[in-house]
Amino acid sequence: MKKVVIAGAGPAGLLLAHYLLARENYQVEIYERRPDPRQIEPSTQRTFPISLQLRGLQAIRAIDGLEAALAEDGVWSKSTLLHGKQGKARRVERKLPLLLLDRNRLTRVLLQQLLNHHSDKSLTVNFNCTCTGVDSKTATFVGANQETFTADFDYLVGADGVRSQVRDALVASGKMHCEQSVVPDAYKSLFVRRVNHDGSAELAANQIHSWNIGSNRRVLLAPQPDDWLHGVILFPLGQDPLADMADAQTVVDYLQEKCPALTPLMTLEEAEALRQRQVSKLMTVRCDRMHVGDHILLLGDAIHAVSPSVGQGCNASLQDVQVFNQL
């Protein structure tokens, strides 16, 4: 039985584990630098909604029951509402529905389904572990208590995202070349109820909501289960419109001017959380190869991250896994 070490428990790494373990001749160890997503409230994270389109869904459908499990934690949508400042909205229809999930929900379901269907003998998942080095047969990690340890492997997969430590180690050793650039946009995560507390205001269900608020700034919200909307406020890097605001009411006043349909749903608590939430920077990645020899592979954002404005990053990562499985 071959041992595969996967660095990264994001969508690509977890789906790859599903594919490999379905073959029944691999032992899989997953190492993830983030905490266990099952133990963290989404509202505390720099998370964002993901739209699973045809490419991503086809990769998901290869594993029995996985799409149904994801659909229970997501929302199907066939249209987007483009909101104007005066409250009018234009509806844009899609031919094929999207499955909308918060990233934390997506990884949580992929992880739980993996654990439900595979034993400890074939699968181990380790969180709070950061890869710090790679050689031909071992990977080095630093754990939650800052202890350093190594994991030997027959095959290593770097599915550890845009800031991949596996990729950086390979680049540093001269085994591959990588170009990275900072995306002009940055974002803050945003969470609101679709219907306000007294039912006097709401945004349409099962639709993505979008506002262009000027100065290359946008608000995007995607429906989630239990009448939540998760999204982002996007703005040019270094130009956070909330940076100099002194309190929550100032945030609400700003949103009232820019996107009045959203304001009745914005509590002062969420406005304050939004004001204080960390700004997330974005990067693109392009590498000259996806593998080193016949035993190290990179997938997803670790190898070809694109701007989130394209809306295809997660779908492309999941398709990587499907194509690799076919090969």
Image (tube, rainbow, N blue to C red):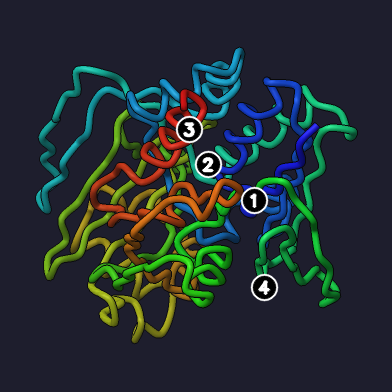
Residue linked to disc 1:
156
Which numbered disc, 3 or 2, marks the residue closer to the eye? 3
Which numbered disc, 4 or 3, marks the residue closer to the eye? 3
Q: Which sits earlier in the primary sequence, circle 3 or circle 2? A: 2
Tell me the residue at 49%/34% (across/down).
321
Residue linked to disc 4:
132
* Inter-mark Cα distance, 1 to 3: 14 Å
Q: For the residue labelled by badge 2, is the local secondary structure a helix, a strand or a loop? A: helix
Type of amino acid at the residue the image marks with label 3: Phe
- Return the x and y of residue 111 as percentages of the image width and height: 68, 37
Q: Residues within 10 Å of mark 2 (few under 14, many from 20)?
A: many
Type of amino acid at the residue the image marks with label 4: Thr
* Inter-mark Cα distance, 4 to 2: 20 Å
- Circle 1/circle 2 CB separation < 8 Å: no
Q: Which sits earlier in the primary sequence, circle 1 or circle 3? A: 1
Residue linked to disc 3:
324
